[in-house]
Image (tube, rainbow, N blue to C red):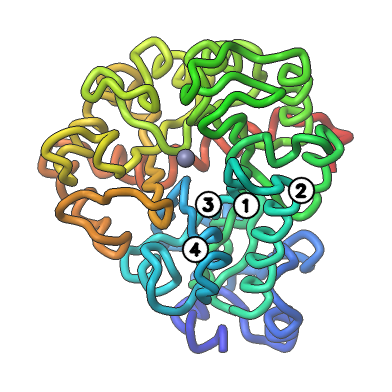
Amino acid sequence: MRCVVAAWVLVFLTGCTDGSAASAASGSSAPLGTEGGPPPEPTSPPPTRGEPLRAAQPVVLQADLHLDTPTQIVRKKLPLDGAGLEAGLAQLRAGGTNLAVMVLWPPQAARWEAHTEALLAAMEAEDRRLDDVTLVRSPEEARRAAAEGRVGIVYALEGAHGIDTSGIVGLRKLHARGLSLLGLTWSFSNRYAGSSGDKGGGLTAEGRALVAEANDLGVVLDVSHASREATLEVCKRSRAPVIASHSDAHALQPHARNLDDEAIRAIAATGGVIGLNLHRPFLGKPGTLARAADHADHLKRVGGAGVVALGTDFDGMIVPPTDLADTSGIGALWKELARRGWTEEEIRGVRGENFLRAWDAVLAARTPAAP
Ligand SMILES: [Zn+2]
């Protein structure tokens, strides 16, 4: 099946031999190139030895850093490849997104750790069921998945209340199952950090230990929803890039969930990125994709083009832009940026390369002992 989906890739890959067919048939939950065996060797045209795989692949990496699709899958019992989602497989494919950060979000009233487990289990089941998606744990695996014509799935925890009792052990366990991003808080302060939702403070002692552990493991720290104080403190303490996966610019729309210029600069200084959020109340009027581009322009002015990314928040009960109902039409945003004079390279950065650069640096900074 993979041979059909990614037939053109055969020009470059020895794929669909017995070996790759077996790895596809064995289920897609094992990350390729680690437990799944060595990466496929490029054949034609022969790239220079040692050249990274991406040089042989004309695939544009397009990432969305924040999708609440797992919540809809569990709540509404919808399959990832079914109808009724804003960022299901069909919408992701139509919009060209081939790297989807799928968020595990424990609601405030839920039994947090049990709810996190339910979301993760649901996504693992979808990953096993669908050959079109595959869990990825590094930029290298993301590029490989994209080259194979699959959508790479990244697991993120939105709010460290999801490891409220299990703490660092809980983070290690989630990481062992593929977690790559850790959002410190959701809309309320927790035992680790203050939230922007209740005017919380900075990091607690446990929060500082959690930041250090995330660095050691190579888990990307995400400060969207964190208080301003916690955001600045994480940027100062983390020895790896810090991201805000789904936040906009406070200067354009003074909402507590948006980042002021000092926070934008602090995140940029770590080498991190900020994912544009498409929730209308965060964008401000007129709530269009052009307004999202205004925020992109501001982030670029303050933090440089390399800080800008996309984290739409689709399937997270957002009020989407008036001219974009789901992620299938996201290409209009790239067109708008081009119209405003963003270079092709800058737009490729926003689409995915900026995040992959940050993620690479996070993995490079982990301790050698980390799994
Ligand atoms: Zn959120």
Give the CA distance from mark 1 to mark 4.
15 Å
Q: Confirm if mark 4 falls within 8 A of ligand 1.
A: no
Residue 46 placed where, x, y %? Answer: 54, 67
The residue at label 1 has a CB less than 8 Å from ligand 1: no
Question: Measured along the vertical axis of the image, is residue 247 above or below residue 42?
Answer: above
Q: Residues within 10 Å of mark 1 (few under 14, many from 20)?
A: many
Give the residue number, with chain letter if any, for mark 3. Answer: 101
The numbered mark, 4 or 2, whose residue comes first in the sequence reads 4
Residue of label 4 = 72
Callout 1 touching callout 3 (CB < 8 Å): yes
Residue assigned mark 1: 155
* Residue at image coords 48%, 83%: 5
Q: Residues within 10 Å of mark 4 (few under 14, many from 20)?
A: many
C-beta proximity under 8 Å, tags 2 and 1: yes
**Residue 68, horizontal then vertical, whole percent:** 49, 54
Q: Is residue 34 visible?
A: yes
Q: Which quarter of the rendered picture does the N terminus lie within?
A: bottom right
How far apart are the alpha carbons under marks 2 and 1? 9 Å
The mark that comes first in sequence, 1 or 3, is: 3
Residue type marked 1? Tyr
Q: Quadrant of residue 41?
A: bottom right
Q: Residue furthest front?
A: 109
Disc 2 target residue: 174
The tag earlier along the polypeptide, 3 or 2, is 3
User: Few, some or many C-alpha atoms within 10 Å of disc 3 (few <14, some 14-19, many ≥20)?
Assistant: many
